Image (spheres, helix red, strand yellow):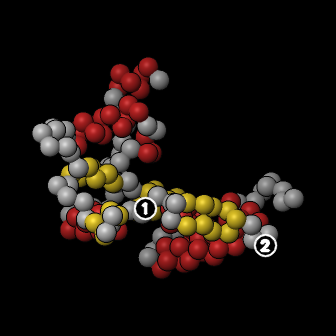
Amino acid sequence: MISPEGLSVPALLDAAALDNREAAVFPDGRASLTELAELSTSYARALVSLGAGPGDHVGALLPAGLPVVALILGAARIGAVAVPWAAAFVKLRPGASLTAEEITCHCLEQLATFKVPRYVRFVTEWPMSGTKIQKGRLRQRIADELAAGSVTEAPRMSRPAAQAEGA
């Protein structure tokens, strides 16, 4: 048994990785403790090569799942904090009317703040590959839009004042 006293999350992961048990299961894949330790180390090296270091907040637009877990652990390895950015793509039914602000307000009422999408975009058609939505194309779309606008920081989310007081 590994004693957690005085150890960091990455150190605990590295020690547990010797066991090589399954650590994470997502719809898009699985990872053992060893694979998760190796992947998070790769993310840490990439972050350092990009200039990230202790105390930095690292934002990333990644799909939910293993990449986000590896980023969070990789950031922790270098003393940084990962801040995943969420984007929501919405296809409205014919005749429906809804704004991005209404979606964000609804999410703030129903979800923890960190789960609320920072960007809401509407689509008229889903990019498809056979019967599956091509999520990578959607991620690339928002990444290109953010890069074109020189966006380097996700907007901060906060609950409406009345709701925050009642919580």
Q: Residue at 42% x, 63% y: name it.
A: 62
Judged left or right of residue 102, residue 3 is: right
Mark 2, residues whose alpha carbon is within 10 Å: few (<14), some, or many (≥20)? few
Kind of residue sitting beneath label 1: Pro
Kind of residue indicated by mark 2: Leu
For the residue pair 96 and 81, the one nearer the viewer reads as 96
Q: Position of residue 126 (x, y in %)?
A: 24, 60
Q: Secondary structure at mark 1?
A: loop
Residue 107 appears in the figure? yes
**Dot 1 crowding, Cα within 10 Å, few <14, some 14–19, many 20+:** some
Residue lying at the far front of the rendered structure:
131
Judge from the rendering whether residue 135 lies leftward or rightward of residue 73; answer left or right. Answer: left
Report x, y in % for residue 137: 29, 68
- Read off the residue under disc 2: 18
- Determine whether 48 is above or below 151 in the image: below
Instruction: Tell which of 81 and 63 is nearer to you.
Output: 63
- Residue 50 is drawn in which quadrant? bottom left
Lateral position of residue 69 relative to residue 21, left or right: left
Q: Which mark is residue 139?
A: none
Q: Secondary structure at mark 2?
A: loop
Q: Residue furthest left?
A: 95
Instruction: Kindly tell me whether residue 146 is visible in this rendering.
Output: no
Q: Residue at x 37, y 35 (%)?
A: 108
What whole-number distance in Å separates the C-alpha atoms at marks 2 and 1?
A: 28 Å
Between 161 and 15, the one nearer to me in the picture = 15
Q: Residue furthest right?
A: 1
- Left or right side of 88 for 84: right
User: Whole-percent x and y of residue 18?
Assistant: 78, 72
- Give the residue at mark 1: 63
Quadrant location, the N terminus: bottom right
Query: Residue 24's spot in the image, x, y percent?
Result: 63, 61
